[in-house]
Amino acid sequence: MRGLGHRLLLRGLRPARVAHAPPLSAPAAARLRTFEVVGARGQRLAAWLALPEPACTASGAEGAPVVVAVHGWGANASALWPLVEPLNRAGLAVLLFDAANHGRSSAEDFSSLPRFAEDVAAVLCALPAQPGVDAARVALVGHSVGGAAVLLHAANRGGVRAVVSLAAFAHPREVMLRWLHAHRIPRRWPGEAILAHVQRTIGERFDRIAPEALIPKVDCPVLLVHGEHDTTVPVADAQRLHARARRAELWVLPGDHDLRAALQPRADRMVGFLHSALRADERR
C-alpha cells in the first residue's frame, strides 16, 4: 500500500510535458545554437544558446556575458523566449534549457526544486565549452519554481553576477499546502503525511530549501519581480523575500503569475539591471 501511495503521489505531482510554444527559432538579433547538457544525475537537458550579433558585443571582449534562463513547473524553455531579443540587443547571450521532465529533456521519476537547481548547475558547468560566451560573467533568470531554483543555486554555490527571480514563492511548504487545498486533501491527515513523504523523496527539508531562508545568503544583486494580481503565488511572498534579502530590488507589475504580457512592454528595467551587473568590467 505504501508503494502504491508513493506512485500515486508522484503521478499527481508530475509536471505536464508540453510542446514549445512558440517553437524556438532565431530572432533577428540572435544566432541560435542547439546542444545537449548531461548532468550529474545522468539527466539529458535540451539547451539553446542565443548569441548577440558581433556588433552588439563590446569590442575587445572575448565573449558575450550570458544570462541563463530557467522556466517554471510544467513549462519549458519557450516560456522565457520573449526575453531573448531584448537581451541580445543589449549585447548579452541567453541560454535557455528544458529542465528534466520538461520539454525535450529526459524523463525522471520526479521533479523537485533541488533538481531544478541541479539542472542549473549542470548547464553552468557546460558553459565554458560554448564558444562566444564569457563563462565568468553569468546571471540567472528564473520563473516560479525556476525563480526559487536560481536563488537556491546563488545561495549555495554562488559564482553568478546577478539574479532575477520572477514570481518565486517564499516557502515550498506553503505551495504544498495550497496544492493539498486545491485537491481537497485534509491538512491534518493525510496532508501532513504527504508533506513528510515529499520531503523524504526529494531528500531535503522544506525549511532548508525555502527561498526566504536562502535569500539572505545571496551576495550578488537580486531583482525580485512579481505580478500584483498573482493568484498562484501571492505578492506577499515577494515582499517577504525582499525584506530578508541583502541586496535586492522589488518590482511589482500589474500582471499575474505568467508575467510575460506584463514584462514585454517594460523589459528595459530588467535588461538594464542585468546589463549593469554583467558589463561592469567593461566600464573600468
Image: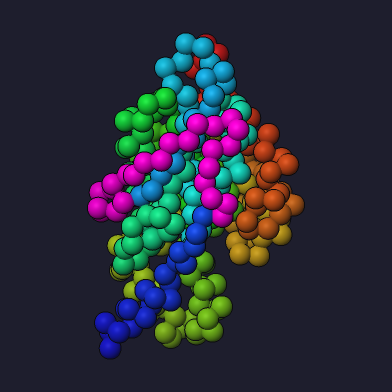
249 relative to 76, above or below: above
Q: Is residue 2 visible?
A: yes
Q: Is residue 268 left or right of residue 274?
A: right
Q: Is residue 84 magenta?
A: no
Q: Is residue 243 left or right of residue 152?
A: right
Image location (x, y in percent) of residue 35: 36, 41
238 relative to 139, above or below: below
Q: Is residue 247 left or right of residue 114?
A: right
Quadrant of the snapshot with the N terminus: bottom left
Residue at x 54%, y 84% (from the top left corner): 184
Q: How is the image coloured?
A: rainbow
The image quadrant that residue 2 belongs to is: bottom left
Q: Is residue 202 visible?
A: no
Of 42 and 189, the residue lying toward us: 42
Image location (x, y in percent) of residue 9: 38, 77
106 relative to 246, above or below: below
Of 249 and 55, the residue lying toward us: 55
Residue at x 71%, y 59% (from the top left corner): 229
**Farthest bottom residue in view:** 1
Q: Is residue 33 magenta?
A: yes
> What is the magenta range?
21-44
Of 263 and 131, the residue lying toward us: 131
Residue at x 43%, y 51% (from the top left corner): 98
Count the marks: 0
Image location (x, y in percent) of residue 64: 47, 24
Residue at x 68%, y 34% (from the top left corner): 268
Image location (x, y in percent) of residue 236: 64, 57
